[in-house]
Image (tube, grey):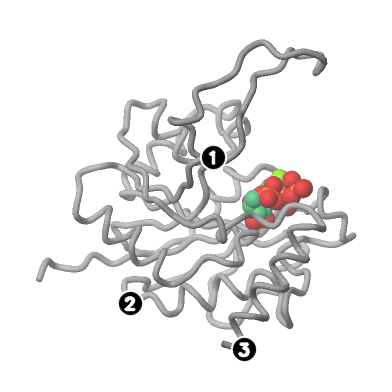
Amino acid sequence: MAERRVAVALIVAAGRGERLGSGGPKALVSVAGRPMLDWSVAALREVAAVKEIIVAMPPDRLDAAPAGVVAVAGGVTRSESVRAALAAAADGEVVIVHDAARALATPALFAEAVDELERGDADAVIAAVPVSDTIKQVRPDGRAVERTLDRSRLWAVQTPQVFRREALERALSAPAELISAATDDAWLVERQGGTVAVLLASSENFKITTPLDLRVAELLLRERSSA
Ligand code: CTP
Ligand code: MG
């Protein structure tokens, strides 16, 4: 058997949740009986390769981090939160980055992403699903179509995104404007010429963004708990 690398997991949970509109940090909103964040922490605890979990929290809610994780204050943008969490990470050649907002990510998905990185020579492996909607590029004024994209090659990307540590460190040393513009860390690796492999995931691993997403997540997680 191949030697197993040690992985550290970074969960970003410092967002404000404006689109959910719950009036408090989204990661602390209750879903199926526990704070949203706790679902991802519980899933990562079941992954053998994961030796440490670091959570970027809202700076005024460090107290709300689950027991046993390393809590750090998050940044103003998502990538800054990733950078703050990485700076607090102990050793580990493999870094898993995950959004607290993806409360339905399973231990199997995390483990597969780590295995895939170890099997291949990519700098990163990202969970993704082919898009099911037709995607059109629309004029900046939002009133007319410019063109229709070729759906067969479009994938919606998710987290977990798993990186070789040096590739993520290099990516996060990009200039501040790029860091704040990034909605995804793999993009920072891509633009430095790194290779990013795709792992087919499930649309059940959706990001809880809106009140509708929260209702769906509640149903699915209750269903899982009772199974
Ligand atoms: N995130 C973070 N630090 C930030 C912004 C976002 O840690 N400064 C985290 C969120 O907590 C979330 C993930 O990044 O787990 C994905 O972000 P998103 O779904 O956009 O969450 P929010 O930024 O909280 O939501 P919104 O954009 O609606 O305000
Ligand atoms: Mg956001």
- Name the mark on residue 226: 3
Asked if disc 1 and disc 2 are in contact, CB closer than 8 Å, the reply is: no
Query: What kind of residue is marked 2?
Result: Ala
Residue 192 position, x and y percent, is 37, 27
Residue 2 position, x and y percent, is 11, 66
For ligand 1, tell me if the residue under mark 2 lies within 8 Å: no
Which quadrant of the view contains residue 57?
bottom right
Which comes before the other along the chain, label 3 or label 2?
2
Residue 141 versus residue 38 in the image, above or below: above
Residue 132 versus residue 112 in the image, above or below: above
Give the residue drawn at x 65%, y 74%.
65
Q: Which tag is nearer the camera, tag 3 or tag 2? A: 3
Q: Left or right: where does residue 209 sit relative to residue 81? A: right
> Where is mark 2, residue-wise?
48
Query: What kind of residue is marked 3?
Result: Ser
Residue 30 position, x and y percent, is 77, 74
Helix, strand or loop status at disc 1: loop
> Where is mark 1, residue-wise?
131
CA–CA distance in space, label 1 to label 2: 31 Å
Which comes before the other along the chain, label 1 or label 2?
2
Q: Which tag is nearer the camera, tag 1 or tag 2? A: 1
Which comes before the other along the chain, label 1 or label 3?
1
| Residue 60 makes an appearance in the image | yes
Query: What kind of residue is marked 1?
Result: Val
Give the residue drawn at x 42%, y 58%.
96
Q: Left or right: where does residue 219 sit relative to residue 8? A: right
CA–CA distance in space, label 1 to label 3: 30 Å
**Of 59 and 140, the residue lying toward us:** 140
Residue 177 position, x and y percent, is 60, 26
- Please identify the quadrant where the N terminus is shown: bottom left
